C-alpha cells in the first residue's frame, strides 16, 4: 500500500500528481523545480540558485516522507542547457554527498521555463 506525501515546506503540486509517494520502504519524489514554497514563485534566476532551491525542496519532501537526502539511491536530472552542467554539479555535489546513481539529460523545455528539474528515489 502506498502513502501520498504532502508538505507545505515544498512546492504544492501544480498538476494531477503527488509531491511524493512512499511505497513500502521507498520514497519517490516528483520532479522538483525552483519554486519557492513560501511564495509559489520561481525567484532564482541562475542555474546555481535554481539548483539550490530544487535541492532544498527535495530535502523537505524527503524529510516529510521519513527519509533524508543521505538516503537517496537514484536521481534523474533535467537541464535546459548542458552548458550549465559544471555549475549544476558544483551545487548538486554539496547536497548529494552519498553519490547516488544518476541520469542527467538536457531537455528542450521545463515547466515555468526553469533551468533544472530533479526527481529522486530514496530509502525510507
Image (tube, grey):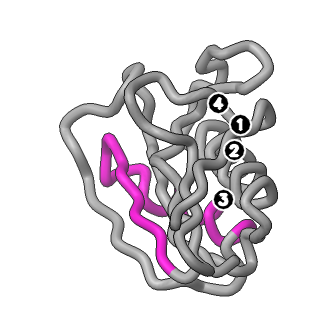
* Residues marked 3 and 1 touching at CB (< 8 Å): no
Query: Between tags 3 and 4, which lies in front?
Result: 4
* The magenta segment: 74-95
* Residues marked 2 and 1 touching at CB (< 8 Å): yes
Q: Residues within 10 Å of mark 1 (few under 14, many from 20)?
A: many
Q: Residue at x 65, y 48 (%)?
A: 5
Query: Between tags 3 and 1, which lies in front?
Result: 1
Query: Between tags 2 and 3, which lies in front?
Result: 2
* Residues marked 4 and 1 touching at CB (< 8 Å): yes
**Quick one: 122 or 88, which is closer to the camera?**
122
- Label 3 and label 1: CA atoms lie apart by 19 Å
User: Would you name the residue on which mark 2 appears?
Assistant: 57
* Residues marked 2 and 4 touching at CB (< 8 Å): yes
- Label 3 and label 4: CA atoms lie apart by 20 Å
Residue 45 horizontal side relative to residue 77, left or right: right
Relative to 116, residue 71 above or below: below
Picture disc at residue 11: 4
In percent of width and height, residue 1 lies at 52, 67
- Label 2 and label 1: CA atoms lie apart by 5 Å
Q: Residues within 10 Å of mark 2 (few under 14, many from 20)?
A: many
Q: Secondary structure at mark 2?
A: helix
Q: Residues within 10 Å of mark 3 (few under 14, many from 20)?
A: some
Q: Quick one: quadrant of the C terminus? A: bottom right
User: Would you name the residue on which mark 1 appears?
Assistant: 10
Picture disc at residue 91: 3
Residue 83 horizontal side relative to residue 41, left or right: left
- Label 4 and label 1: CA atoms lie apart by 4 Å
Q: Residue at x 19, y 37 (%)?
A: 108
Amino acid at each position: 500500500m502506498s502513502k501520498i506525501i504532502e508538505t507545505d515546506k515544498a512546492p504544492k503540486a501544480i498538476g494531477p500528481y503527488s509531491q511524493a509517494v512512499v511505497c513500502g520502504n521507498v520514497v519517490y519524489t516528483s520532479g522538483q523545480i525552483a519554486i519557492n514554497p513560501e511564495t509559489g514563485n520561481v525567484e532564482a534566476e541562475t542555474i546555481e540558485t535554481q539548483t539550490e532551491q530544487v535541492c532544498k525542496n527535495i530535502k523537505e519532501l524527503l524529510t516529510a516522507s521519513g527519509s533524508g537526502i543521505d538516503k537517496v539511491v537514484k536521481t534523474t536530472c533535467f537541464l535546459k542547457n548542458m552548458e550549465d552542467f559544471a555549475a549544476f554539479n558544483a551545487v548538486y555535489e554539496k547536497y548529494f554527498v552519498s553519490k547516488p546513481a544518476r541520469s542527467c539529460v538536457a531537455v528542450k523545455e521545463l515547466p515555468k521555463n526553469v533551468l533544472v528539474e530533479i526527481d529522486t528515489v530514496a530509502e525510507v
